[in-house]
Every structure is written in C-alpha cells, then in structure tokens.
C-alpha cells in the first residue's frame, strides 16, 4: 500500500472536507463538482503530483478557489443587472409619458395644451390616437380640448412675440 505524503490529508479527512465544503469527487471521470452551484456544470480537475497521484488538500483548495471565482463572476453579473435597473429607473420618466387620465381642471388644460404644442411640431399635427396613447381618455379630450387649444395658441403667440422682440 502506497504511503501518504506528509503534507497531504488522509482519505477520511478528505471525505470530511468534501462534505464540509459541499464538494463531490467523481472518481469515474476524475473530476470534482461544486454542489453549491451544480447548474453551473463546472467540473474541476484534481491537482496531481509528479507521480500522477492526487494531492487531496491542494485539490480541495483549488475547488474552493474556483468557487470563489465563480461567485465573484455571479456578483459582477448581479451588479451589472442592478446598474441596468437603476439606469432604466432614471430614464423611464423621460421616456414614458406620465398618465394623464387622473388630471382634471386647470392641470388637465395646461398639460393638454403642452401636448398640442408638441404634437403640432409633427407633420401629422395633433392626432386623437396619439393623445390617447399619451394617457388621455376620450371624455377628458372632449371636455378640455377647446380650452387647451386656446391656451396652446396663446402660448405659441407669446413665444413668437418674444422671439421677434
């Protein structure tokens, strides 16, 4: 029976260390697998000495290093996802028009006038479907459109007068 090297651990200590660190040694394919991250499908090769024998302690340390690298990679992916979510949260108010269905009275007239001004800069002019897409309801448009047109015309006339002066 071959002697164990002095700097290596025994087979029972090896088995205990495997259980302790949630690792498994697959002797038929001579690989280790990390049981904490089995879906990763990563198999870790054992560390061998010059004679081709496995160095148990060094192999376990190698598996733990591979786990740490994989968890660092997962952390980087999670951080990138958080950054994307934060950026989307910052851009969403600018990219998505706020709902106008809850506006009433002077607020609705003012916002609808602003929407009329923005819509008139397009070739198609003010289109009912676009206003509905912005969040306006049919009854709101019927109720406030006349007043909003007057406000929008006055704003544009005032802006034109300021530019000419």
Image (spheres, rainbow, N blue to C red):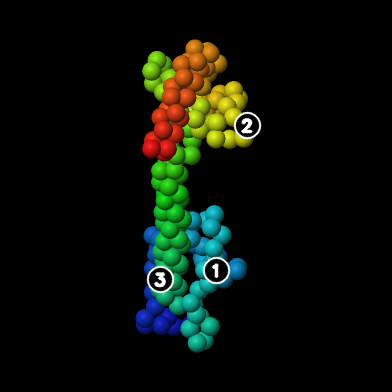
87 or 50: nearer the eye?
Answer: 87
Residue at x 41%, y 64% (from the top left corner) = 68
Local crowd size for mark 2, using a 10 Å CA cut-off: few (<14), some (14–19), many (≥20):
few
> x, y percentage for residue 38?
52, 56
Of the two numbered discs 3 and 2 in the rendering, the one whose residue sits closer to the viewer? 2
Q: Is residue 15 visible?
A: no
Residue tagged by mark 3?
A: 61
Looking at this rendering, what residue extends furthest in the front direction?
165
Residue located beneath label 2 in the image: 124
Q: Which residue is mark 1?
A: 31
Q: Which tag is nearer the camera, tag 2 or tag 1?
A: 2
How many residues crowd around disc 1 within 10 Å: few (fewer than 14), some, or many (20 or more)?
A: some
For marks 2 and 1, the one nearer the N-term is 1
**Is 120 positioned to the left or the right of 161 in the image?**
right
Residue at the outermost right position: 124
Residues under labels 3 and 2: Cα distance? 69 Å
Front residue of 61 and 10: 61
Q: Earlier in the sequence, mark 3 or mark 2?
A: 3
Instruction: List the single residue furthest toward the bottom.
Output: 50
């Amino acid at each position: 029976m071959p002697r164990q090297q002095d700097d290596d651990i025994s087979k029972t200590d090896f088995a205990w260390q495997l259980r302790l660190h949630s690792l498994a040694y697959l002797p038929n394919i001579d690989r280790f697998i990390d049981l904490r991250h089995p879906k990763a499908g990563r198999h870790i090769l054992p560390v061998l000495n010059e004679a081709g024998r496995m160095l148990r302690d060094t192999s376990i340390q190698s598996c733990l290093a591979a786990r740490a690298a994989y968890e660092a990679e997962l952390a980087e992916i999670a951080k990138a996802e958080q950054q994307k979510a934060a950026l989307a949260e910052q851009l969403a108010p600018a990219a998505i028009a706020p709902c106008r269905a809850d506006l009433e009275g002077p607020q609705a007239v003012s916002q609808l006038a602003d929407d009329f001004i923005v819509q008139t800069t397009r070739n198609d002019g003010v289109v009912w479907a676009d206003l509905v897409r912005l969040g306006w309801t049919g009854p709101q448009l019927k109720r406030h459109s006349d007043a909003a047109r007057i406000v929008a015309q006055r704003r544009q006339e005032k802006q034109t007068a300021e530019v000419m002066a």
